[in-house]
Amino acid sequence: MEKKVMKNRFTKVMVAILMITLIIGVIPCKIAVMAASDESISTIVMDKPPFQYYKSGKVKNKKNQSIQLKLKSSKANQITDDENWFKKNKLSMKQYEVPNPFADTFGNLPEKIDTYYEDLIITSAFYDESYIYCTYGSDFSEGYILNIYNAKSLKKVYSFDFTKYRYSPKYVKADYDYIQQKVNWATIKDNILYVSHGHDTYAKSSKQMNAYITAIDLSDMSILWRTNALVSNSYNFTLINDVIICGYGFTAEPDYLYQIDRNNGKVLKKSLLKSAPYYIIQKGKNLYVRTYNTDYVFGIN
């Protein structure tokens, strides 16, 4: 985990170098070209969110239950063998590779997807059957602009500016460079955008105000609910019926798999894990959970 923090410093320096080289034309022009954007879609600048649990008056109280997860296996992994885990279990995160001049790669994004948002570079791209979700920032440690494209037409349908979600109202000043919260994952269901934000360093650095999931009503762009802090810093989350399964953990902090009520954002259940959860993927009647040092398989009852 500490390596991620150091990587952020390195990335910011490298991006400054990249900007200079783009200007003088050293980097191949294919990376520098920005795809045509749908100018008819205005970017919604989101207001500063609550940094504690919140539920709007529009949320209706519905009875909901957690999903019964039965542990099938728990095996130690080699920590760096993520790719092998995906292949062995025939899993996919449904992500695109974005252009990365540091790795000398052009990525595999569909041609109509914007690789820039104004002066920001695309930092991640993932998709489901209906939408492609792309984040943008000044370097690969950031992702506070979220553009959403129709998966078939590739037209931009939503654009969000989460600048005001980046920093908690209180934090340790010495850790300011490491507490910027970015979009980790997002999905749309029933005209509601579910989006997770978080940073990579210790929770104490942002005064325990980190790692949230927010539900946004796309009919008026208002917040329906926001979870308590410290429930979702995993790379992704998954929806199963009316439950969001996500995870939180970090060095010297408790590591849990959380079940969130999709109706109101409250925690239905939490399950202790051996280390911080990274990937949470449903395949058939199984839930695969990859953590820092352990691979889990749960049966979904």
Image (cartoon, helix red, strand yellow):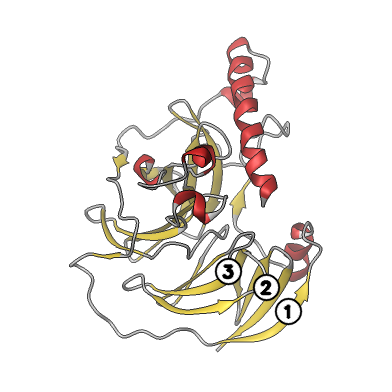
Side of 34 where 46 appears, left or right: left
Regarding residue 113, the answer to whether it shows in the image is: no
Regarding residue 188, the answer to whether it shows in the image is: yes
51 or 219, which is in the foreground?
Answer: 51
Task: Give coordinates of residue 181: x percent, y percent.
Answer: 47, 47
Side of 56 where 127 appears, left or right: right
Circle on res. 274: 2
Query: Label 3: few (<14), some or many (≥20) within 10 Å?
Result: some
Which element carries disc 2, helix, strand or loop?
loop
Q: CA distance from mark 2 to mark 3?
A: 9 Å
**Image quarter hosting the C terminus:** bottom right
Mark 3 vs mark 1: which is more N-terminal? 1
Q: Are marks 2 and 1 in contact (CB under 8 Å)?
A: yes
Q: Amino acid at mark 3?
A: Pro
Mark 2 vs mark 1: which is more N-terminal? 1
Q: Mark 3 sits on what residue?
A: 254
Task: Give coordinates of residue 218: x percent, y percent.
Answer: 28, 55
Q: Amino acid at mark 2?
A: Lys
91 or 78, which is in the foreground?
Answer: 78
Which element carries disc 3, helix, strand or loop?
loop
Task: Give coordinates of residue 285: x percent, y percent.
Answer: 60, 82
Q: CA distance from mark 2 to mark 1?
A: 10 Å
Which element carries disc 1, helix, strand or loop?
strand
Query: What residue do we see at 46% from left, 39% from top?
Result: 173
Q: Mark 1 sits on what residue?
A: 74
Q: CA distance from mark 3 to mark 1?
A: 18 Å
Give the mark toward the camera: 3 or 1. 3
Q: Is residue 26 above or below residue 60?
A: above
